[in-house]
Amino acid sequence: MSEEKSLKEQKLLELEEMKKQINVLKGKVTTLEAKKKDIEKDAEDTIGHLIYDKRKEIERSYSEVLKEAEQRLKVKEKEKADERKKNIDKVVNENTKETKESILYLKNHIKNILEEHKLPGFVNSSFYMGVWYPTNIGEWFIGVLVSLIILAIPIVISFVFAKDALIKSFPNVTIRYIIIALIYLGVIFVAGLIWLGIDKLTKKNIDVLKEIKELRKNIADNNKVIEKITKDTNKEMTDDKFDYTKIDREIEAGKLEVDNYRKKKEEAMNHFENVTVEEIKAKAKEEVEKKTKPIIDEIEQVKEELDTLQKKHDEFKLSIAGE
């Protein structure tokens, strides 16, 4: 009885040892499969980086060449624009020569009037006409705007720049507002004195101001004529009015060059995506298969051993159970 028990224990130990061997083989299969996956993942990452780098390299190479071609085209287009502007300016100058001479004569006439009547140069300005001698809406607007600015000066001084100083010096609100009112009156008084002084100095002969204003109106009318001539000339001066044959040929050649590089870039990218990428993947697949084939063979071998040992284990286990 004791011998039978000892024999059974020995068989159980042998069964346990077989189980350990089975687990070792399973672990080996898992390890080999993980190693295979690591190789495949590394290859996949390498392929991804390689494709990305090559794609960027192609894009960069063609983009640099294309950018240079586009820059050359822009230079030629600017050359034509400058030449066109020069030609138009020449026509405008010719068409406005008489009017510009008239403006020069009118300005010299105003200058002589100012010198003859000993008037300061600022009398011939929109600012003076708006503040001291307004006769139209534009001049009245300037006068009103200047008046509003002057009226705002004491408010800005009292409530922005000198606010803290006033509060500190005059804590009493009533006294403080009296001081503000005095500041206000002071600014108005000084501005009034300046206005009256200039008014008295420049309005000794109102007919002189009327003449200056009339001359200024003539100048403004002539400027409008120049503006209209310039606008009309720009509309009328089409490219067929001048000879741009040489520069147009260069521009056309530049456009063809740009289009050609764009087409080449598109073709290169299409070839890369449809051919090169597949070649890279195929080559990488070959390399992976070379590296993984021994591992796959070993996995198959271990699995066969595992199957054999598992069957042996199961049969042995059943035989023990049947005793």
Image (cartoon, rainbow, N blue to C red):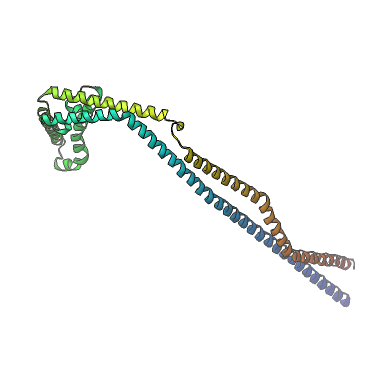
Describe residue 276's horizontal placement relative to residue 200 as left or right: right
Labels in figure, total? 0
Residue shown at 90% from the left, 66% from the top: 322
Q: Is residue 154 above or below residue 137?
A: below
Is residue 302 at least partly visible in the picture? yes
Q: Nearer the viewer, residue 90 or 37?
A: 90
Is residue 125 at least partly visible in the picture? no
Residue shown at 44% from the left, 39% from the top: 80
Question: Where is residue 316, by image quadrant?
Answer: bottom right
Residue shown at 67% from the left, 56% from the top: 280
Describe residue 106's horizontal placement relative to residue 33 as left or right: left
Q: Nearer the viewer, residue 262 or 130?
A: 262
Q: Is residue 211 above or below residue 246?
A: above
Q: Is residue 87 above or below residue 138?
A: below
Identify the image quadrant of the N terminus: bottom right
Identify the image quadrant of the C terminus: bottom right
In percent of width and height, residue 56 lies at 57, 53
Describe residue 273's horizontal placement relative to residue 312 as left or right: left
In percent of width and height, residue 203 lies at 11, 26
In percent of width and height, residue 182 lies at 12, 34
Question: Where is residue 21, by image quadrant?
Answer: bottom right
In percent of width and height, residue 272 lies at 64, 51
